[in-house]
Amino acid sequence: MSGKGGKGGKGGKGGKAPTSKKAPQSRSQRAGLQFPVGRLHRFLKQRIHANQRVGATAAVYSAAILEYLTAEVLELAGNACKDLKAKRITPRHLQLAIRGDEELDSLIKATIAGGGVIPHIHKSLINKSSKKKKAAS
């Protein structure tokens, strides 16, 4: 006996057990996300000062947030698209989806190009027109 113990090591009868090589998995796959965790991590590192670091979970968390928000907006826009009997989501559908949801409206303050305006008639205008019609008849 050489005194090194165990089954590992070079030569001899106790070689290493046959290991099955796993295919490399991306961090997005590991986290169960569609958004690219590695790319987000790279972008986060580019935006900080030279002597600071970015944790590994920061990119995963950011990717999860972005994926959730994207899924939420696309679901609402898809519903708006279906209501208008269209097959494609256009900027108008995105505008209707975002402005129709109170939380998304407060989060997304940007102007959507080609989104148009939200249909709204002030209550006082509706009441005046109905009173005139009643008075006329």
Image: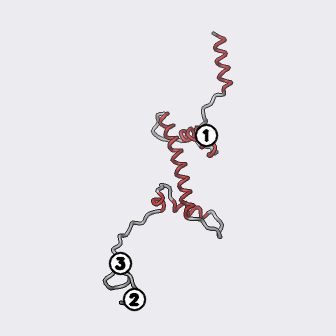
Q: Residue 34: where, in percent of width, then height?
A: 47, 55
Residue type indicated by callout 3:
Lys
Image check: 57 left or right of 109?
left
Q: Is residue 11 left or right of residue 109?
A: left
Residue at point 55% right, 40% down?
97
- State which quadrant residue 125 falls in: top right
Query: How far is the residue under mark 2 from the one under mark 1?
Result: 72 Å
In the rendered image, residue 43, in percent from the top left (x then y), is placed at 57, 61
Upstream in the sequence, badge 2 or badge 3?
2
From the image, state whether disc 2 or disc 1 is nearer to you. 2
Mark 2 neighbour class, 10 Å CA radius: few under 14, some 14 to 19, many 20 or more: few
At label 2, the amino acid type is Gly
* Amino acid marked by disc 1: Glu
Q: Tell me the distance, in whole angstroms, between the alpha carbons under discs 2 and 3.
A: 17 Å
Q: Residue at x 60, y 32 (%)?
A: 119
Residue with the most extreme top position: 137
Q: What residue is disc 1 on?
A: 102
Viewer-nearest of discs 2 and 3: 2
Residue underneath mark 2: 3
Q: Quadrant of the N terminus?
A: bottom left
133 on left or right of 5: right
Neighbour tally class for label 3: few under 14, some 14-19, many 20 plus, Cα within 10 Å:
few
Q: Which residue lies at the image location 62% right of the left edge and 62% below the top edge?
A: 47
For mark 3, give the secondary structure: loop
Residue 16 is tagged as 3
Q: Secondary structure at mark 1?
A: helix
Can residue 114 be seen in this snapshot?
A: no
Dot 2 falls on a residue whose secondary structure is: loop
Q: Is residue 61 above or below residue 6?
A: above
